[in-house]
Amino acid sequence: MGSLQIDVLGASFAIKANEDEAYLKKMLGYYKKITDQLEKGGMMKNPLHISILAGIMLCDELYKEKSKNAKYSETLTDPDDQAEKLTIELIKKLDAAIQ
C-alpha cells in the first residue's frame, strides 16, 4: 500500500492506494505531463477544464488500447488462424507421444 502527495493545477491533497508508491508517482507524473501540455497549449486556463480534458484524453487512450487488445485476442482465438491450428496440432501430437 502506498501513499502519494498530489499537487496538480493548484490542488493539493494526499491519497493512499493499494499500489506501491513508485507506481503511484509514475501515474501522477504521466497525468502531470498531460495537464502541463494542455496548460502550455494556452487554449485553456481554467484548472477544472484542464483536468476534465486530461481525464477524457486518458480515457480515450485507454479505450483505444483496450480495443487493440480485444482485436488481438479475437485474432488469436479465430479458428481460421494458421498459428492456432498449428499449435493445436502440436499439442495433439505431444499428448499422443506422452501417452
Image (spheres, rainbow, N blue to C red):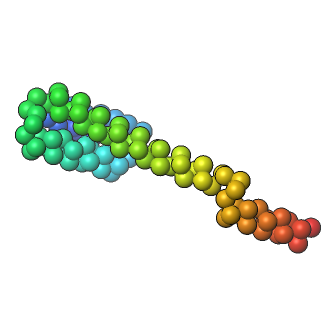
Residue pushed farthest right? 99
**Residue 55: % across, % down:** 28, 34
**Split into 4 quadrants, where in the image is the C terminus?**
bottom right
Residue closest to the eye, 25 or 45: 45
82 above or below 33?
A: below
Is 57 positioned to the left or the right of 89 in the image? left
29 above or below 43?
A: below
Residue appearing at x 88%, y 72% in the figure: 97
Residue closest to the eye, 75 or 1: 75
Residue appearing at x 38%, y 47% in the figure: 20
Residue 9 appears in the picture as rendered: yes
Is 94 positioned to the left or the right of 21 in the image? right
Residue closest to the eye, 81 or 43: 81
Residue appearing at x 53%, y 46% in the figure: 70
**Residue 86: % across, % down:** 73, 66
Q: Quadrant of residue 62?
A: top left
